[in-house]
Image (spheres, rainbow, N blue to C red):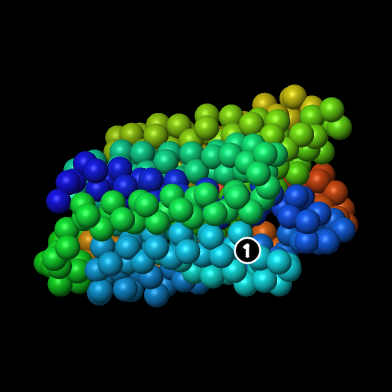
Amino acid sequence: MHPRLLSILLNLGHTLDHLVLLIFAAAVATIAAELGVDRWEDLMPYGAPAFFFFGLGSLPAGKLGDLWGRRQMMLLYFIGMGVSSILVSQAQTPLQLSLLLALMGCFASIYHPVGIPMLIQQSKMPGRAIGINGMMGNLGIAMAALLTGWVIKDYGWRAAFWIPGVMSLCLGLVFWRVSPAHELSPAEKNARHSFASQEDKFKLFFVMTLAATTGSFLFNFTTNGNNEILFSKLGDELRDPAVIGTLLAAIYFIASFSQLIIGNLIDRVPLKKLYSRVIFLQLLAILAATQLDGWSFYFAQLIFMCAIFAAIPFTDAMIARYVADSMRSRFSGARLAISFGVSSIAVWLIGPIVKEWGFSAFLWLMAATSAATYVVIRFLPEAIDR
């Protein structure tokens, strides 16, 4: 086994997960034109099944990760993501596209409840490990915006799917060679004791899942809607997909480092207080964005994306701190199935909301979602700060 290389592969797996899931959002206008759909807003709901199964699949993926083994599940992840991405590139109708995206979402659901627990199971500083992993995942979002725009410009939207598909198969081959082939499943190992009472665990799961659901709503609203909202805010002179993709990639690249900072702070600062302040900053930035246009909006978008990305590591950090390794994948899978499954509705809503009421209403809905997250996390048990 090569621990350092294994960590690198697991982090690259997170990059791949977010990269492939967001290609559709970055390419939706181009895909709509080629498939004969009049408006991109009408095609957007066809991407929702990918995010629905991305959430729903987390439950069986987490259970299999604990009981069957995390190595086996991660091999399935790399192979499945590779094959399904290549298949998406061959879609000829909106229905075919939607079904193949749903298949890809099933394989994408494996990573979070399996890959992250596998990464932190031996870590002495889980906050830092989660921060680095989160940064790598969000670099995938940046790559989706940047590479999709440039690939579409030169080679078309289909290449934007099959290229990362081939990359996933290659990563799977390397993972197969360097990961421990005969490691016991987490459920077969001796579980360590967690530090939270049963009452606190139940409250933690309930509140954390609510906060993760509203946070996932906001994450899906922004990462799937940012491309088109930036088009509308910057004017016709910048309606080049490659330019918009580059501008968004810059935002996502900078915002990715917020997770690295938060990951290090989580190991040192009271978690509930830190989480509340991040969400409050997020809310203020979105409220400011509702009143702005042009480059001032772009700056506000950078701030709220930094805060949205910064909020992501908290749930994984709480699981690492209070849940025994032998059942972390199942705990994560249950939380993700609820939060990602419910928040997949956000992807379906983007097109109809923008078509009916415009981007102003969309931004106010984002602000309301952020406010709901802030209220929910106030109910986290005080035990998490001890």
Residue drawn at point x = 19 percent, y = 69 percent: 185
Q: Which residue is mark 1?
A: 90
How far across and down, in percent of the image, does residue 291 sit? 80, 33
Residue at image coords 34%, 56%: 172
Q: Secondary structure at mark 1?
A: loop
**Looking at the image, which residue sits at the far front?**
155
124 versus 254 height, above or below: below
Q: In this image, 70 relative to 32: left or right?
A: left
Give left or right: position of 28 versus 148.
right
| Res 7 quadrant in image | top left
Label 1: few (<14), some or many (≥20) within 10 Å? Answer: some
Q: Position of residue 329 (x, y in %)?
A: 32, 65
- Amino acid at circle 1: Gln
Residue 323 horizontal/vertical position (percent): 27, 61
Which residue shows up at 31% across the image and 38% down it?
128
**Residue 113 picture location, percent across and down:** 37, 62
